Amino acid sequence: MSDKIKHSGIINAIRGECISVRILQSSACSGCKVASHCNSSETKEKIIEVNQPGVQSKYKIGDHVVVVADMSVGFRASIYGYILPLVLMVVTLVLVIACGAGEGIAALSSLGILFPYYMALFLLKDKLKEKLSFTLE
């Protein structure tokens, strides 16, 4: 099993040491022979920013490249994006109900806790970029 996540893409823009790479992210079934006749297959275009020193001399816009990240980056992103918000929502729901509030207030509180969580992620985005970074192969 490979410990790397790889996506091939095309360089979209180069700004200083930051390269924007356009990749096509496919669902697992998009490679199926009948995918064109099926509604569940989908392909999305994404832009990934890669910070890499000395990129001006090596690459140019339109080059085909492979974007690489460690598997731990994917796990860490899943934790920040899915698991921690779910845990926060469940804990908030249980605590608000335990304090004697109604289920409606508890549901709104558990949804409301997401605003400060995602605001904190937004404010810490520069630190997260360091931990959740991609490189070019």
Image (cartoon, rainbow, N blue to C red):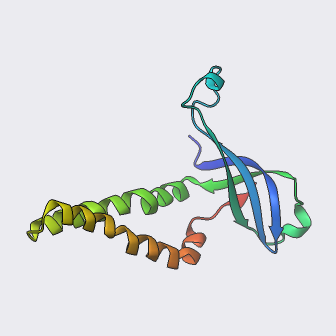
| Residue 117 falls left or right of residue 34 | left
Question: What x and y, as percent, mark residue 6?
Answer: 66, 48
Residue 73 against residue 112 in the figure, above or below: above
On the image, which quarter does residue 97 sit in? bottom left
Question: What x and y, as percent, mark residue 18?
Answer: 76, 70
Question: What x and y, as percent, mark residue 23?
Answer: 71, 49
The residue located at (23%, 64%) in the rendering is 91
Residue 45 against residue 123 in the figure, above or below: above
On the image, which quarter does residue 108 sit in? bottom left
The residue located at (53%, 55%) in the rendering is 74
Question: What x and y, as percent, mark residue 62?
Answer: 87, 53
The residue located at (58%, 37%) in the rendering is 27
Residue 59 against residue 18 in the figure, above or below: above
Q: In which quarter of the image is the C terminus?
A: bottom right
Q: Farthest residue to the bottom: give it.
A: 123
Q: Farthest residue to the left: give it.
A: 100
| Residue 94 falls left or right of residue 53 | left
| Residue 113 falls left or right of residue 123 | left
The residue located at (26%, 68%) in the rendering is 109
How many numbered callouts?
Answer: 0
Q: In which quarter of the image is the N terminus?
A: top right
Q: Nearer the viewer, residue 71 or 105?
A: 105
| Residue 87 falls left or right of residue 4 | left
